[in-house]
Image (cartoon, rainbow, N blue to C red):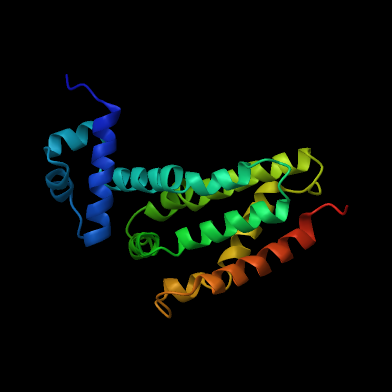
Amino acid sequence: MRVKTQARRDAIVEAAKYVFREYGFEVASMDMIAKEFGGSKATLYNYFKSKDEIFFAVVKDTVETDFEPVFQLLKQDDELPISSRLTQFGSEFLKMTLDSSVIAARRMVLAEIQRSDIGRLFYENGPGLVIQLIAEFLEHEISAGRFVSCDTNLAAKQFKALLNAELHELYQFGCIENVEKACIDDVVTRAIEAFLTIYKKPN
């Protein structure tokens, strides 16, 4: 019986990240991932049932690992003004979601949704997980008396949508390739001003 280890699983996920990014989901194969990993297909199947399952692991790992430092910005000292925490988070979050590898992953999913359940699973392990983490932050702020009582899941979706409203589709459809930091900062400022107008409890 093959013994599973977390280190080997992590190595497979890292290899898959590279293969998916370089070749796209449709072209990528278990053989290609095994070659990049430096092991056999049998080893891959000992950890994952399919290419889809590896892809979901890649998405979840990206959110939990690459995005974790961004979400830590929401967990800073409560004495820091809420607008400052949201601004720092918003700027880093928007830069991450506009990264070429993240945009490429979303394009891969959009190309595959007619052939499998990958769209729903991608949402649950990616954007859905992000919304959950933002909602948990909002619940803390409501308990602390800084935000009005609300449906935190809905508010989290609205906050994420405000951050993405001005630039996301332009990137997704290839209308622009890069934007200056000052522009991102302006977008984030407008998004947070709108969000706080709705949900911040009056002083």
Residue 11: x and y in percent read: 24, 38
**Image spot of residue 95 (x, y percent):** 48, 62
Residue sitting nearer the eye, 120 or 34: 34
Seen in the picture, residue 140 relative to 91 is either above or below; the reply is above
In the picture, residue 108 is in which quadrant? bottom left
Q: Is residue 141 left or right of residue 201?
A: left
Name, please, the residue furthest toward the right.
203
Q: Write down the quadrant of residue 13 in the picture.
A: top left
- Residue 49 seen anywhere in this rendered image of the structure: no
Residue at position x 41%, y 55% in the image: 119
**Vertical side of 168 occupied by 85: above or below:** above
Q: Which residue is pictured at 39% across the width and 59% down the height?
A: 102
**Residue 186 visible in rendering:** yes
In the rendered image, residue 78, in percent from the top left (x then y), is placed at 71, 41
Q: Is residue 155 above or below residue 38?
A: below
At x 48% / y 44%, what residue is drawn? 68
Q: How many marks?
A: 0
Give the position of the N terminus as an image quadrant.
Answer: top left
Coordinates of residue 71 in the picture (x, y in percent): 55, 46
Dividing the picture into quadrants, the one containing residue 45 is top left
